[in-house]
Image (cartoon, rainbow, N blue to C red):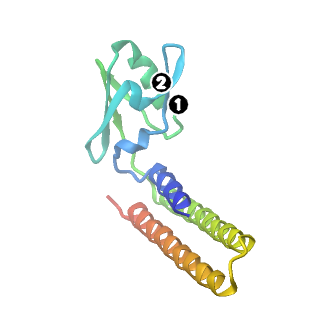
Amino acid sequence: MEKARKILDSELKKLRTGRADASMLDNVRVKAHDADVALAHVAQVSATDPRALTVNVFDPELVAAVEKAIRSSGMGFNPQVAGTCIKVPIPKVTAEVRQQLSKTAANLTEIAKVSIRRARQNAVDKGKKAGLPKDDLQKFEKEIQTLTDKEVKAADEALKAKQAELTSTD
């Protein structure tokens, strides 16, 4: 259950809000030295201001590969190279795109909640198969339901926070 919520949190972080966040580039993969590696392995990403990221590349030979990876990440970024430093301006997000991102966040949350409920059902089934006495089984089911309710509530709160972040104007 907790794993499903952690996955939800990481998926919600990927949604672009129009504000710079170093984690926006966490999923960017760079072709470096005949291997496909995470951007974090070849560069340091930092948010210099609310509208831009700065990527400091460790190896000057990889600057072009890092720029290409950021440009082709599908996030609509247009990086600008200055030596071994790459500045990534974050474009403004339109109201229409914000609304679509909000719907995507709601869908991701619903998927996580289904996964949490599935984990609850699996735990209850295991309790039944373990041959627990009826009283212990009811107590176990009640504890599992309490945990499920807590995780679902946390997922809903994460959704509300993300939607507030998405709909707020800069």
* 55 on left or right of 67: left
Between 16 and 129, the residue placed more toward the observer is: 129
Q: Residue furthest left?
A: 48
- Tell me if label 2 and label 1 are in contact, CB under 8 Å: yes
What label does residue 72 carry, if any? 1
Residue at 52% x, 30% y: name it: 72
Q: Does residue 50 sit above or below 4 in this rendering?
A: above
Q: Residues within 10 Å of mark 1 (few under 14, many from 20)?
A: some
Between 127 and 109, the residue placed more toward the observer is: 127
Residue at 48% x, 24% y: name it: 68
**Residue under label 2:** 68
Between 150 and 105, the residue placed more toward the observer is: 150
Q: Residue 83 appears at what percent x and percent y?
A: 28, 17
Q: Does residue 125 sit above or below 58 in this rendering?
A: below
Residue at 60% x, 67% y: name it: 116
| Quarter placement of the C terminus | bottom left
